[in-house]
Image (cartoon, rainbow, N blue to C red):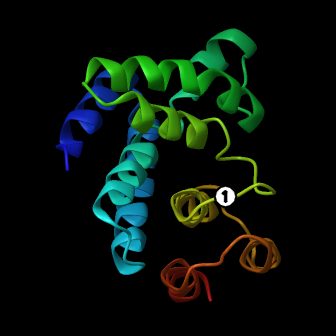
Amino acid sequence: MRNIGNVIEAMIEYYGTDARRIQHFLKVYAFAKEIGEQEGLDEGTQELLEAAAVVHDIGIKVSEEKYHSSAGNYQQLEGPPVARELLGRLGYEEAFIDRVCYLVGHHHTYSSIDGLDYQILVEADFLVNIYEDGMDQKQIESIRNKIFRTKSGSRFLELMYA
């Protein structure tokens, strides 16, 4: 497993003084790491998940510059090329980069979740977004029913927002 610290450092450099975005990806990374470990991901999938969690919102910066919006559809459009460049510069293999970019380009699309890495990334992002966006119990219940599938993610959701 590579040193995820290199990806974290590169993302902190990328976001610069945007502490809010840095705090967000670090929280999503922490939840994704823990859920992945508890769900028993193999080492390669765990590494991929952790990298994807760190870079999942990398498209926000470009989206805000180009469209004056951080909407999920713009993030999904603009994120993969930036993630590809960053991960390539850090020496990741093409297949690894392809899957991370797929996750970055789909992490706001919930109808086509096609792997445990994708599922966990979405759950980790929601665990953070529920708090950051101040969602109410009705919204949380809807998310619980529509999105959460892993035992670990569901347990965290219940413990934090019951």
Q: Position of residue 34 (x, y in %)?
A: 35, 71
Q: Residue at x 40, y 69 (%)?
A: 36
Left or right of residue 94: residue 89: left
In the figure, is residue 12 to the left or right of 48? Answer: left
Query: Within 10 Å of the Cα at label 1, are there few (<14), some (14-19), or many (20+) other Cα atoms?
Result: few
Amino acid type of the residue tagged 1 in the rendering: Asp
Residue plotted at (74% across, 15% down): 67
Callout 1: helix, strand or loop?
A: loop
Q: Quadrant of the C terminus?
A: bottom right
Q: Residue at x 37, y 44 (%)?
A: 51
Is residue 24 shown left or right of residue 14?
right
Percent x, y of residue 63: 66, 20
Dot 1 corresponds to which residue?
114
Looking at the picture, tell me which residue is in the foreground, 128 or 88.
Answer: 88
| Residue 37 x %, y % | 33, 73
Write down the quadrant of residue 76 in the picture.
top right
Is residue 77 visible in the rendered image? The answer is yes
- Whether 2 is drawn above or below 90: the answer is below
In the rendered image, which quarter is residue 17 located in? top left
Q: Is residue 134 above or below residue 70?
A: below
The vertical placement of 68 against 51, above or below, is above
Furthest-front residue in view? 95
Q: Give coordinates of residue 13: x percent, y percent.
A: 29, 22
